[in-house]
Amino acid sequence: MNGTNLLKIAFRALANNKLRAFLTMLGIIIGVASVIAMLAIGQGSKRSIQKQISEMGSNMIMINPGAEMRGGVRQDPSAMQTLKIENYNKLKDECMYVSAISPNVSSSGQLIAGANNYPSSVTGCSIDYLTIRQLTVEQGEMFTENDIRTAAKVCVIGKTIADNLFPDGTDPIGKVIRCNKIPFRIVGVLKSKGYNSMGMDQDDIVLAPYTTVMKRLLAQTYLSGIFASALTEDMTDNAIEEITTILRREHKLKSTDEDDFRIRSQQELSSMLNTTTDLMTTLLACIAGISLVVGGIGIMNIMYVSVTERTKEIGLRMSVGARGIDILSQFLIESILISITGGLIGVLIGCGASFIIKNVVHWPVFIQPWSVLLSFAVCTFTGIFFGWYPAKKAADLDPIEALRYE
């Protein structure tokens, strides 16, 4: 019996039991649609996180003081004074793999402008901070190197600060705000960046010359940290190695001494978040995949019923010359048709659900072609795997006993 005839017989058998065939497909449909939707949500979240990290500066390197042990007690890193202006200057002059570098000091307090106030912090930095954090001045201008040398009381503010201190829409350029009684003249407003992947408002920011913050707000001579940007993302490890070598030399550390500073890169953060996202995506896909297994069991159950119902038909076909392989192929084709048809419907529903989630719920969603192919391949395998045993049972029936079956 050729394949065309077997296919026609399989189609006719399914057409005679349309509702039963559809109900059998339902498990496959739900499983495939769920897997595609879950993977789309997971991949969308991953891409969203990568985009947010890229916007923060994918080449960014953060250098912070290390936590020392004193009397057997590990100290708070923020209280350490291991990073100095001299370290920043050495790194700026000697680092070959760094494209931009900025000191970092911060003072929190209540910002006041006239009758309005808002709790925030003032970040002391250099001009390179804009490049490192990929910030853009939308109104006015950035403070200058001369402002840094003279510790001028000027600042650049983010959109959130402007909206809260000047709610009536007044142009903030040239206005004075106060932080811990120290006046700062606003020279620029940053372009809005919104919230990042960790829920932090990137527009809640005030930038001032680091010399101003150190002398007038904090009265300290050490840095809270140093931000740098590698020439390219691929050179981040080279930049970290170079920074480590210079800082160890400047801090006169022996080869046996531990670093008294910590260096972190955006790549580490990206890798950690991607690992977490991949784990959650895999978990969601596995949960959705259970539907495919349930659908496969449904196929096996229905094929068993079909074999039982059509025992006399099987005996009749065998008696007129059908071989065991023909009977096996007939029922296996029916099983595969149920799986493939259910898979196609599931793909359409899964893609449609992903589109609705993206445009109605506004979740980040991205459908990768391999997820559709994988779901389709799995449902095809499910049809073969769960349809094989009932088909084999039908092929092994004795034709005489089958003809006698009532």
Image (cartoon, grey):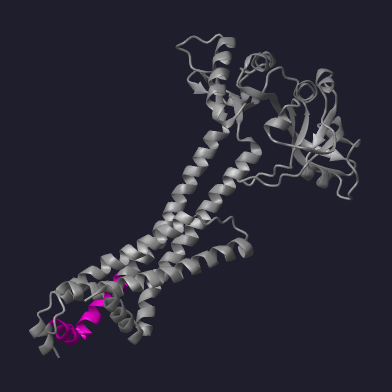
The percent coordinates of residue 7 (x first, y second) are 30, 76
Left or right of 344? Residue 146 is: right
Q: Nearer the viewer, residue 334 or 86?
A: 334
Left or right of 16? Residue 34 is: right
Quarter location, residue 202: top right
The percent coordinates of residue 362 (x first, y second) are 63, 60
In the rendered image, residue 309 lying in the magenta stretch gets the answer yes
- The residue sitting at 45% across, 60% down in the picture is 372
Q: Which part of the image, by quadrant, shows the N terminus?
A: bottom left
- The residue sitting at 46% across, 51% down in the picture is 280
Q: Nearer the viewer, residue 339 or 83?
A: 339
Classify 296 as above or below 142. below
Left or right of 133? Residue 310 is: left
The percent coordinates of residue 328 (x first, y second) are 20, 73
The percent coordinates of residue 283 (x first, y second) are 42, 54
The answer to whether residue 10 is visible is yes
Left or right of 27? Residue 84 is: right
Which is the main secondary structure of the residues drawn in magenta? helix
Quarter location, residue 225: top right
Count numbered badges in the picture: 0
The answer to whether residue 300 is visible is no
Quarter location, residue 308: bottom left
Q: Nearer the viewer, residue 226 or 338?
A: 338
Q: Nearer the viewer, residue 368 or 170?
A: 368
Classify 394 as above or below 254. below
Classify 286 as above or below 3. above
Q: Which part of the image, by quadrant, shows the C terminus?
A: bottom left
- The residue sitting at 77% across, 42% down in the picture is 191
Q: Give the extent of the magenta segment.
A: 297-318
